[in-house]
Image (tube, coloured by chain):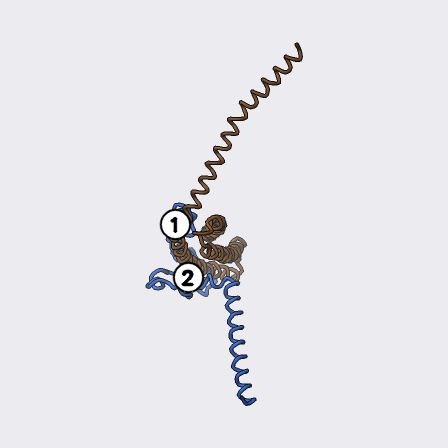
Chain colours: A brown, B blue
Amino acid sequence: MKKWLLVGMMICGVVLSVALVRPALAEDVATEGAGESVINGRLDGISQNCENIHDKLVTLQHDDSRARVYLGRYYETILSEFVMPLNVWMVAHNRSDAGLIKNQSDFAEMRGNFVADYVSYQKELESLVSINCKNEAAKFSDKLATVRKARAKVANDVAKMRELMDVHLDLVLQLKGKI
Amino acid sequence: MTSGARNLVILGVASVVIALTTTGVSLAVYHNSGDIYLDRSRPGFLPDEGEIESEYDESEYEFEDSDVLTTEDLDEYLKEYRVEMEAVDAYQNPFSAEALSDEKLGI
């Protein structure tokens, strides 16, 4: 009797676990399938619009080059015509300010980072443009992710440069308050 | 062919080889150093017409050779400095992520 009870419980257990696990498995497969179809759809989109994407990337290269020159020129002017001359005057008149000097050094360093990160980004972008997206959509998609990361670094540098400009403004206002 | 003519040919070929080698090395350095990406004088990256004249509105401030720094001096300095800040802000969303988004690229 006990034996039959044990066997019955085992059968119930098996039936229950199959009933619980099956829907979960089916769900996983469905999600996996949907994910795969999204990826495939994206790769198809890359292959089909390859020419347009290529043209947009080339235009972006030109726009970025223009932005780099524009911003780089102003960063240079701010450093050489405003930040440095003020520190030079302060040092020459024995009134050097540690905050202003540190900010000048941070500004120069960040400007160097901006140029270096821009060059890395452009190298990645150029290599993305050279990929045949019609035939190598997966490779193009992977490279696009890398280019996006490199571009984000440049955008971050631009934001930091802007912060340093604000810091300089605050420091000069503080200096004015002390006069 | 006389030995003089042969030497002349060797000299010509050697000159061409040396010129090609040095040019190749220069181009490799130009490319690998990243200078190529900072150079807007390369074909296809030249500034647009009128861009140089109209786009940049640079200002500057010169400190007078005096021992005194007045609040008026700093006001003038800040006025010119803010012109530069506004010019930087005028460039809308440089290097924004949106430009490389799937939607923007039409993927």
Which residue does the image show at 45% across and 39% down from the upper left? A37
Chain where mark 2 sits = B
The one nearer the camera, A147 or A21, is A21
Q: Is residue B81 visible?
A: no
Q: Residues within 10 Å of mark 1 (few under 14, many from 20)?
A: some
Q: Residue flagged by tag 1: what amino acid is it?
A: Asn
The one nearer the camera, A162 or A100, is A162
Q: Residues within 10 Å of mark 2 (few under 14, many from 20)?
A: some
Q: Is residue A74 above or below residue B4?
A: above
Chain where mark 1 sits = A
Q: Secondary structure at mark 2?
A: loop
Residue A172 place in picture, x, y as percent: 46, 53
Which dot, 1 or 2, sits closer to the camera? 1
Q: Secondary structure at mark 1?
A: loop
Total numbered labels: 2
- Position of residue A2 in the picture relative to residue B62 (left or right): right
| Residue matched to label 2 | B61
Q: Residue flagged by tag 2: what amino acid is it?
A: Tyr
| Residue matched to label 1 | A49
Residue at mark 1 to residue at mark 2: CA–CA distance: 51 Å
The one nearer the camera, A50 or A179, is A50
